[in-house]
Amino acid sequence: MIRAAREADIPELRRIEVEAGRMFAAVGMDAVARDEPFPAAELLEYQRDGRAWVVVDAADRPVAYAIALWVDGLAHLEQVSVHPDHAGRRLGASLVEQVAAWARENGSPTLSLTTFTEVPWNGPYYRKLGFHPVSDSDLSPGLRAIRAEEAAHGLDEWPRLVMRRVL
């Protein structure tokens, strides 16, 4: 079941991100695997603004989450993380659809994201969900800023791009 994230979920969201991030070590991306999760205060901002969703288990404990933001007036999927114990159940896809529905309801004609191009559960996965690459020359100022921030964080050590889906 998907529901809006609650303030009490924030520590669990950070744990999910850490556990999901460890999967990157298997594809030689140790720096990504060791990256710190979103700070609790930042996740709390998403939660309080209604831009954070969780998939919960039978005990109402989050096992996956997504957060979104507005970039140049359009919806942007900032993060999707699924705990590895719950991978392969289309939970990430369900969260992407939740964010897409939210974006449509709030007037965004598209949903964008940034991703690694060659990691199976990144670029190829998002292509299957209807996202298409956006050329650097077509990036809005806000998306350029996100890519610059990612590059400064060292994420461009591996091929990375912006993708967009028309809603």
Image (tube, rainbow, N blue to C red):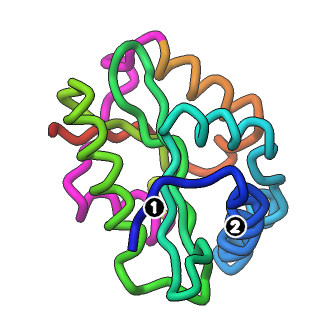
* Secondary structure state at the residue bearing disc 2: helix
Q: Does the magenta stretch include residue 51?
A: no
> Label 2 near label 1: C-beta < 8 Å?
no
Residue closer to the observer: 54 or 113? 54
Q: Residue 122 carries which label?
A: 1
How would you rate the neighbour count of disc 1 (Cα within 10 Å): few for under 14, some for 14-19, many for 20 or more? some
As shown in the figure, which amino acid type bears the numbered disc 1?
Asn
Quadrant assignment, res 126: bottom left
| Residue at position x 38%, y 85% in the image | 89
Residue closer to the observer: 167 or 127? 167
How would you rate the neighbour count of disc 2 (Cα within 10 Å): few for under 14, some for 14-19, many for 20 or more? many
Residue behind mark 2:
21
Residue closer to the observer: 141 or 117? 141
The C terminus: image quadrant? top left
Query: What is the span of residues highlighted in magenta in the rendered image?
Result: 119-141
* Secondary structure state at the residue bearing disc 1: loop
Q: Position of residue 163 (x, y in %)?
A: 34, 41
Residue closer to the observer: 128 or 8? 8
| Residue at position x 79%, y 37% in the image | 41
As shown in the figure, which amino acid type bears the numbered disc 2?
Gly
Q: Is residue 127 above or below residue 108?
A: below
Precedes in sequence: disc 1 or disc 2: 2
Q: Where is residue 42 in the image (x, y as percent from the top left)?
A: 73, 36
The N terminus: image quadrant? bottom left
Q: Is residue 67 above or below residue 122?
A: above
Q: How far apart are marks 1 and 2 (CA)?
A: 12 Å
Q: In this view, does 121 lie to the left or right of 60?
A: left
| Residue at position x 24%, y 46% in the image | 101
Q: Position of residue 83 (x, y in %)?
A: 61, 77
| Residue at position x 18%, y 28% in the image | 109
